[in-house]
Image (cartoon, rainbow, N blue to C red):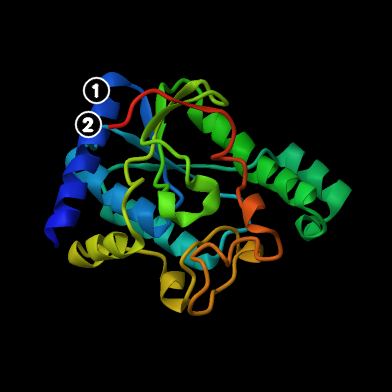
Amino acid sequence: MSDELNKKIEATVTVLRQAAREYAQVVFANSLGAEDMVLTDLIAKHQPDIDMFSLDTGRLPQETYDLMQKVRNQYSVPLKVYYPDAAQLELYVAEHGVNGFYDSVENRKACCHVRKVEPLKRALVGTKSWITGMRREQAVTRDSLQASAFDADNGIQKFNPLLEWTNAEVWEYIKANDVPYNALHDQFYPSIGCAPCTRAITPGEDIRAGRWWWEDPQNKECGLHVGKSMPLKRV
């Protein structure tokens, strides 16, 4: 691996150790994307006391479930899975239909709220901080992210230790360390969410162009990582 990547690995491990040291109840929200698989590997190797969870929306691609099982089999850190509240999901489908998220941005965000935001709230109950694999270059909506900031929406600290990593560095780490990853990445799916809301991209497109492709770029967040964040310090 390059010297630059080794430096970023050291910096990332430092952030993970800081989170575990300063916030005893810290959890990693694992979306099973390429970035999060890097963090899965680093946490397992350097800070295995950080708990890890994932959100199963009920509409994930089979390849994501396959990877979920690989994580369970390969890593000692348990992956806890949270699901949408059945009653809320039934109400949404009754009002909008099973694919009503295509009809408007409001409907799509309401679907994301039921399938992602509400389960996340439950996953964060009792924690003091959480970790994500978000990177600054992923999307225009993530340009103002901080490596460490207070998440006012959830009332806890939030860490983004891969914030300054490039996409090339993510894949350099994965290949060098034989980290498992979603098979859809080899089919031109750089960013993977729910199956009906994700498509492959063509050369030259933005890496998140395949997510909610029918919407404007400024709307392309599910609600997990938007809201009021108050930067405290860069680490």
Binning the other alpha carbons within 10 Å of mark 1 as few (below 14), some (14 to 19) or many (20 upward) gives few
Within the image, what quadrant is residue 182 found in? bottom left
SS of the residue under disc 1:
helix
Q: What element carries label 2?
A: helix
Please give the label number shown on residue 104: none
Does the rendering let one see residue 58?
Answer: no
How far across and down, in percent of the image, does residue 191 sit?
49, 62
Instruction: Calculate the distance from the C-alpha at mark 2 to the C-alpha at mark 1.
Output: 6 Å
The kind of residue tagged 2 is Arg
Residue corresponding to mark 2 = 17
Q: How many marks?
A: 2
Dot 2 alpha-carbon crowd within 10 angstroms: few under 14, some 14 to 19, many 20 or more: some
Q: Which residue is drawn at 55% across and 74% down?
A: 200
- Left or right: residue 22 versus residue 107 is left
- Asked whether the beta carbons under mark 2 and mark 1 sit within 8 Å of each other, the answer is yes
Left or right of 221 on screen, residue 76: left
Q: Residue pushed farthest left?
A: 3
Q: Where is residue 138 in the image (x, y as percent from the top left)?
A: 46, 56
Seen in the image, is 232 located left or right of residue 208? left
Residue 225 versus residue 155 in the image, above or below = below
Residue 58 pos. (x, y %): 62, 53
Q: Which residue lies furthest to the right in this view?
A: 95
Q: Which residue is rendered at x = 47% and y = 40% of the image? A: 144
Who's the residue at 65% across and 61% down the image?
Answer: 212
Callout 1 amino acid: Arg
Residue 29 appears in view: yes
Vertical comparison of 76 with 118: above or below: below
Q: Is residue 71 left or right of residue 212?
A: left
- Residue closer to the observer: 184 or 231: 231
Circle 1 sits on which residue?
21
The residue lying at 27 percent from left, 60 percent from top is 169
Image quadrant where one finds the N terminus:
bottom left
